[in-house]
Image (cartoon, grey):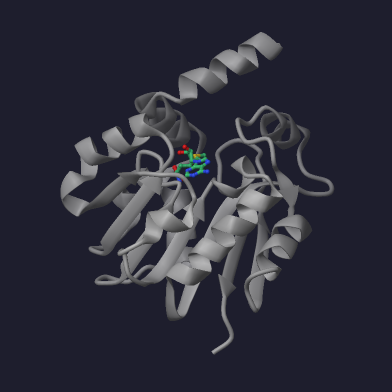
C-alpha cells in the first residue's frame, strides 16, 4: 500500500496527470460554485496565486491581472504553455523575496498549499500574503481538512495526500489568526465528487 501511495504521489507531480486527476475528482460546477461564493474575483483585479500549480484555476477567473508562483518548475512550465497570455508565472518558493517588485494585490489565494507546509512555513505564507494585500483586500485558502464525523473515505484519501500537514479548521484558523485580524473558516464536504473535506479560509486586516 505504501508503495502504491508513493507511486501515485510521484505521478501527480506530472502537470497533466495532476490536472486530469483534479478534474476527475472535482467538477467544473463545484469549482465555479466555490469561486463565485468564496473567492469572488472581479475583472480587472490584481490576483496573486501562491502555489498556483499548473494554474488550472485560471479557467474560472475573469480577466484579471494574474501572478502565479509555485516551487515546481514542471507546473510553472505547464502553466506558461497553457495560459502564458493570461498572466505571469514564476518558479519560486513561499519567500518574501518572491514578491519583490510585484506590488500589491486585490486578492491573494493559496489553493491546496497550506497542508503542504509546516507551521513555520504556513505562518510565512500568511505573512507574505499580508504584505502583498492592498488595503481592504483578502487572502483565500482552501485545503484538505480533518473534521469530526467526516466520511471514512475522506479520511483515507486525506491521509494519503502528498501534503503531510493537514489540520482541522481550528488549526488553520489559529495559524491565520497569528497574522490576520479577521479570519473566517468554513468546512465543506461538497467540493469533490468523492467524499472529501475541505477548510475554506478567508483572512483580512482590520480597516
Ligand atoms: C495541491 S497543489 C495545488 C496547486 C494549485 N493551487 C491548484 O489549486 O490546483 C499544491 C501546490 O503547492 C506547491 N507548493 C508546495 N509547497 C510550496 C512552497 N513552499 N512554495 C511554493 N509552492 C509550493 C506545489 O508545488 C503544488 O503545486
Q: Is residue 168 visible?
A: yes
| Residue under the point 58% across and 62% down | 126
Q: Position of residue 161 (x, y in %)?
A: 63, 31
Residue located at (55% from left, 56% from top)? 125
Left or right, 38 with respect to 20, comes to right
Q: Is residue 19 above or below residue 32?
A: above
- Pick whichever, 191 or 79, lies toward us: 79
Task: Please tell me which residue lies in front, 137 or 59.
Answer: 137
Please state, as top left, top right, bottom left or bottom right, where the N terminus lies in the image: top right
Name the quarter where the C terminus is drawn: bottom right
Would residue 84 be found to the left or right of residue 134 on screen? Answer: left
- Kindly give the residue lying farthest to the bottom in the view shown: 207
- Front-most of residues 136 and 192: 136
Q: Position of residue 62 (x, y in %)?
A: 27, 62
Query: How far from the left and from the top, in percent, is residue 184?
Result: 65, 70
Q: Is residue 40 visible?
A: no
Amino acid at each position: 500500500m505504501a508503495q502504491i501511495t508513493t507511486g501515485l504521489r510521484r505521478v501527480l507531480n506530472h502537470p497533466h496527470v495532476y490536472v486530469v486527476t483534479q478534474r476527475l475528482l472535482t467538477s467544473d460546477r463545484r469549482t465555479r460554485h466555490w469561486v463565485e461564493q468564496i473567492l469572488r474575483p472581479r475583472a480587472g483585479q490584481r490576483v496573486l496565486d501562491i502555489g498556483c500549480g499548473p494554474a488550472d484555476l485560471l479557467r474560472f477567473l475573469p480577466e484579471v491581472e494574474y501572478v502565479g508562483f509555485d516551487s515546481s518548475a514542471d507546473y510553472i512550465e505547464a502553466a506558461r504553455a497553457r495560459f502564458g497570455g493570461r498572466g505571469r508565472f514564476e518558479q519560486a518558493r513561499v519567500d518574501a523575496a518572491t514578491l519583490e517588485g510585484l506590488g500589491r494585490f486585490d486578492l491573494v489565494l493559496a489553493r491546496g498549499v497550506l497542508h503542504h507546509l509546516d507551521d513555520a512555513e504556513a505562518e510565512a505564507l500568511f505573512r507574505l500574503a499580508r504584505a502583498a494585500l492592498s488595503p481592504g483586500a483578502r487572502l483565500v485558502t482552501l485545503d484538505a481538512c480533518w473534521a469530526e464525523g467526516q466520511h471514512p473515505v475522506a479520511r483515507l484519501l486525506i491521509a494519503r495526500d502528498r501534503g503531510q500537514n493537514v489540520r482541522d479548521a481550528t488549526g488553520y484558523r489559529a495559524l491565520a489568526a497569528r497574522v490576520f485580524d479577521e479570519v473566517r473558516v468554513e468546512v465543506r464536504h461538497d467540493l469533490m465528487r468523492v467524499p472529501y473535506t475541505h477548510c475554506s479560509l478567508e483572512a483580512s486586516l482590520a480597516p
